[in-house]
């Protein structure tokens, strides 16, 4: 199995620019999660989708952040405009059945974002 | 709401020694518990999980963890540390009624293996 695929792996951008992170979940999985990892706050759940529908976006820090899932095999996380404090590793993850049932959530390799 | 506390942001052990990484959880309902490992510049990989079957759970790479309800703990152990075990370890909890369908993670414990 190919696993969760994220792109880009590394991104350096200037403050104010738009950033788009992409994710391809594992085929057949019906849940998709976006997490952010920073030294200060650890791993935070930003948003998750079930069957392509956003279920809970309460973790999205600001209106500058948005996420979409137009189909079962693709999702994007967009930051517009970006700020230096957005620098972090962004993980996409997917699962079959969701975490509340004890199902395993599989993580991608992460997108390392630096905003200068 | 559920939460996880990992005691010790850094743990250092000698190669061949016992590894013990501590995790305590808070949940108003029976939880599901997970341990993930993150190697440098990589994503998170599942080590093991507790889903209300056996309280002693065995995972990959010789790791195991025991669910103790009375202590609200899910500590991770390995009898003999190997250099390749050096990584960041995360405990996570998921509980029905917790709101989000994802996992709530602890802050992580960085495991250092001394030669």
Image (spheres, coloured by chain):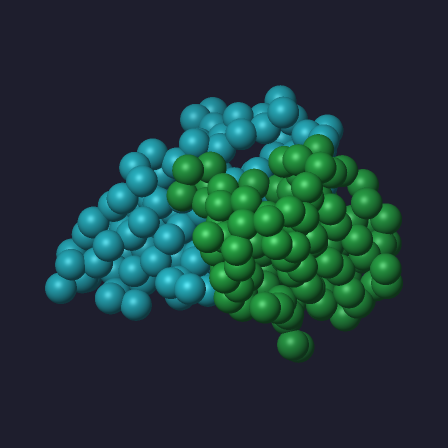
Image quadrant holding the N terminus of chain B, namely: top right
Q: Nearer the viewer, residue A1 or A20?
A: A20
Answer with the quarter of the image where residue B60 lies: bottom left
Q: Residue B25's spot in the image, x, y percent? A: 49, 30
For chain A, give the colour: green
Task: Please give the name of the residue rendered at 75% of the width and 50% of the height, measured from the top-left corner.
Answer: A67
**Does any portion of residue B92 appear in the rendered image?**
no
Q: Nearer the viewer, residue B66 or A39?
A: A39
For chain B, give the colour: cyan
In the drawing, does residue B86 fall left or right of residue B114? right
In the image, is residue B85 above or below residue A66?
below
Q: Residue B96's spot in the image, x, y percent? A: 71, 33
Q: Residue furthest bottom?
A: A1
Task: Please give the name of the residue rendered at 81% of the width and 45% of the height, measured from the top-left corner.
Answer: A54
Q: Residue furthest top?
A: B28
In the image, is residue B27 above or below residue A99?
above
Image quadrant holding the C terminus of chain B, namely: bottom left
Q: Nearer the viewer, residue A12 or B14?
A: A12
Number of labels in the image equals 0
**Does any portion of residue A81 appear in the rendered image?**
yes
Task: Please give the name of the residue rendered at 86% of the width and 48% of the height, measured from the top-left corner.
Answer: A53
Q: Residue B75's spot in the image, x, y percent? A: 39, 41
Answer with the quarter of the image where residue A7 lies: bottom right
Q: Residue B42's spot in the image, x, y percent? A: 46, 64
In the drawing, does residue B41 fall left or right of residue B43? left
In the drawing, does residue B52 fall left or right of residue A100? left
In the image, is residue A84 above or below residue B4?
below
């Amino acid at each position: 199995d190919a696993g969760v695929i994220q792109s880009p792996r590394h991104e350096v951008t200037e403050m104010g620019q738009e950033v788009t992170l992409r994710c391809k979940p594992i085929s057949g999985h019906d849940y998709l999660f976006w997490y952010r990892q920073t030294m200060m706050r650890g791993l935070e759940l930003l948003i998750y989708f079930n069957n392509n529908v956003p279920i809970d976006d309460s973790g999205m820090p600001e209106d500058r952040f948005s996420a979409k899932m137009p189909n079962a095999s693709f999702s994007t996380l967009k930051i517009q405009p970006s700020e230096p404090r957005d620098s972090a590793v962004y993980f996409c993850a997917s699962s079959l059945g969701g975490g509340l049932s004890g199902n395993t959530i599989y993580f991608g390799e992460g997108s390392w974002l630096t905003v200068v | 709401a559920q939460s996880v506390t990992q005691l010790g942001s850094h743990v250092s052990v000698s190669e061949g020694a016992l590894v013990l990484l501590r995790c305590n959880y808070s949940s108003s309902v029976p939880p599901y518990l997970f341990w993930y490992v993150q190697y440098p510049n990589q994503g998170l990989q599942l080590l093991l999980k507790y889903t209300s079957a056996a309280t002693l759970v065995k995972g990959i790479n010789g790791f195991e963890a025991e669910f103790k309800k009375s202590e609200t703990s899910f500590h991770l152990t390995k009898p003999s540390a190997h250099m390749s075990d050096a990584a960041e370890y995360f405990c996570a909890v998921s509980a029905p009624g917790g709101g989000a369908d994802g996992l709530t993670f602890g802050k992580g414990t960085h495991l250092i293996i001394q030669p």
